[in-house]
Amino acid sequence: MFIARAIVAVSLIIAAGTLPAWATDGAPSRVVSMNVCTDQLAMLLAAEGQLHSVSHLAGDPGVSVLADEAGRYVVNHGLGEEIFLMQPDLVIAGTFTTRATIDMLRRLGFRVEEFAPEGTFEGVKANIRRMGELLGRQQRADELIAELDAGLAELASEPAPPLSVALYSANSYTSGDGSLSNAVIRAAGLQSIADRLGIVGVQRLPLEQLVLANPDLVVLGERTYDRPALAHENFRHPAFTAIASQDRLVRIPDRYWICGAPFTLEAARLLRDAANAHAEAAR
Amino acid sequence: MSDRMQYVAVLGALAVATLALFFVSLTTGPADVGFGESIRALVSGDADLLTLVMREIRLPRALLGLMIGATLGLSGAVLQGYLRNPLAEPGLLGISASASLGAVVAIYTGISVAFPLGLPLAALAGAVLAVLLLRVMAGERGGTLTIILAGVAISAFAGAMTSLVLNLSPNPFAATEIVFWMLGSLTDRSMTHLWLSAPFMLAGWVMLAMLARPLDVLTLGSDAAASMGVDMRRVQFLAVFGTAASVGAATAIAGAIGFIGLVVPHVLRPLVGAVPSRLLPASALGGATVLLAADILVRLIAPGRDLKLGVLTAIVGAPFFLWLVWRTRRRML
């Protein structure tokens, strides 16, 4: 087993080392990504053989849309030593990746590019464009951006039912202006409760304010855990179940909107479908 | 003014303060609604959403604040009398921490989802173990120092085990909830929590109230009390299970809230002429007053941040505890 794995690892290294492949001149040929969001952008954009390693979260179907595809790459855990041994010519990280690791990699002479999480579709497009430039894959980036624009335009062209939406997560947190989830609600053509309450970024939304806001739809994360915690008790509170009856609950898998990418559109589509279904049922 | 009249006056003043704070608690919250409007919505029940907020969120919170405060004040007074120790208090003696541990095991293993009564029962079991252990450690003539040191050890152990259970939970939120179990909070507790804990707290109160007269006699010493016909085994049973039932249920719902049981009886003792049977009801009302006030303050000081109750009670209680230690230092050494 170990030998088999070692052979795979060695052959991967050789393959990656000897075949800079289809990457255009000057483009990095051995790229390591350390963040689940940059992992997915890199997987979507990189040329064959150009991306060497992605983070372990990229293979977690709970947070990664491309979990199946992540199996094709070497897994890293964002540890400096691990990345050093891979000898990449480009390291891509999120701005939330451990500072110590990034600083160390930079001291060791690696080229590290950081990506900030984006809260708007414009920002997502800018990230795709930048990733395309870094990987020398501008053309592929333009295709993805065009795809995203087409999807957004399609959503905007169909009329949306005039419904209000509240995001409600564990520990009563919600996302307001400046968050990607809020951008998704707007893209779906719905009205966010957070906007009405003036909530900016990720903040607590006390249960009683949620009840008084009386949203038409309540969006919960899909993720469930084996064991309970008090953080999820807000979903069982009698006041919550009274306003968020089953027909008002919408579950959108976290993986679609944890990261801003072309597939974030899917979250907006799911939300729009749920709104249409709710409006249909009300009629 | 006679003793009796002063006692009645103290009780009356405490009752008025408790009632007033109860209504302030009912009308304090993140949703900005006027006093009259919210009380009307609570009573009339025709203001749809506001009624829901008042009846399902504010009312259980205020009622739990009242009952848990009373539990802590009452059990503090009983423990101080029963152990004849000025520093006795559920928090300091590790009873709250052990009850927390019981509750944490019940909640995070999923027992309480399948069997809701498991939550107060597990907390009660934790509290009983702590009290029994304290009793054994203290022996028949347990000195102040022995009991406090045993309490420190029990607290530390129960706290560590609580952290361990929470850290080992596969749920990533569990570890951050250590703060709740160590410092306590009443945020978004519901009527379900009230129904689950109230019977245990009421049963505990009844048992502790039955100790009023024996505690009076006990001030003469346990030998004297025994010779005067006080059944010491019954006293022990009532003290252990009364404290465990009420503090266990309170802690299972709101986490461990410290110092109320210490400060309240000390402040009220001189006002009621240092008679245990009079101190018990006064301490219950005093505890309710203090916890309701703390729960109002956490909402006013840091709205939306879920400041924990134990932070406020410790700010007042810890310096008071130091002062008590200073005063009793001579006797302890």
Image (cartoon, grey):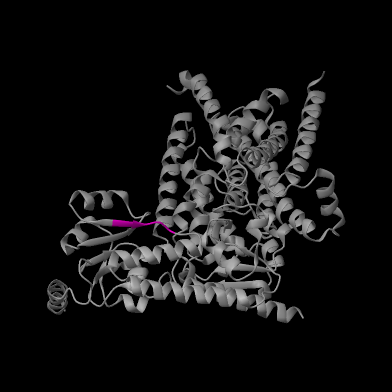
In the rendered image, which quarter is residue B313 located in?
A: top right
Residue drawn at (65%, 34%) of the image: B215
| Magenta-colored stretch includes residue A265 | no
Q: Is residue A45 above or below residue B317?
A: below
For the N terminus of chain B, which image quadrant?
top right
Q: Nearer the viewer, residue B152 or B227?
A: B152
**Residue A159 image offset from top left, x and y in percent:** 67, 76
**Residue B193 image offset from top left, x and y in percent:** 65, 57
Q: Nearer the viewer, residue B243 or A193?
A: A193
Residue A5 lies left or right of residue A121; in this view the side is left
| Magenta-colored stretch includes residue A114 | yes
Q: Is residue B277 above or below residue A108?
A: above
Q: Nearer the viewer, residue B74 or A190?
A: A190
Residue A260 visible, this angle:
yes
**Residue A56 image offset from top left, x and y in percent:** 31, 67
Residue A106 lies left or right of residue A187; in this view the side is left
Which is the main secondary structure of the residues drawn in magenta? strand
Residue B115 visible, this angle:
no
In the rendered image, which quarter is residue B120 located in?
A: bottom right
Residue A267 lies left or right of residue A102; in this view the side is right
Q: Nearer the viewer, residue B105 or B23?
A: B23
Start-end of magenta stretch: A113-117
Residue drawn at (28%, 59%) of the image: A78
Q: Is residue B328 above or below residue A225?
A: above
For the C terminus of chain B, which image quadrant?
top left
**Residue B296 image offset from top left, x and y in percent:** 68, 40
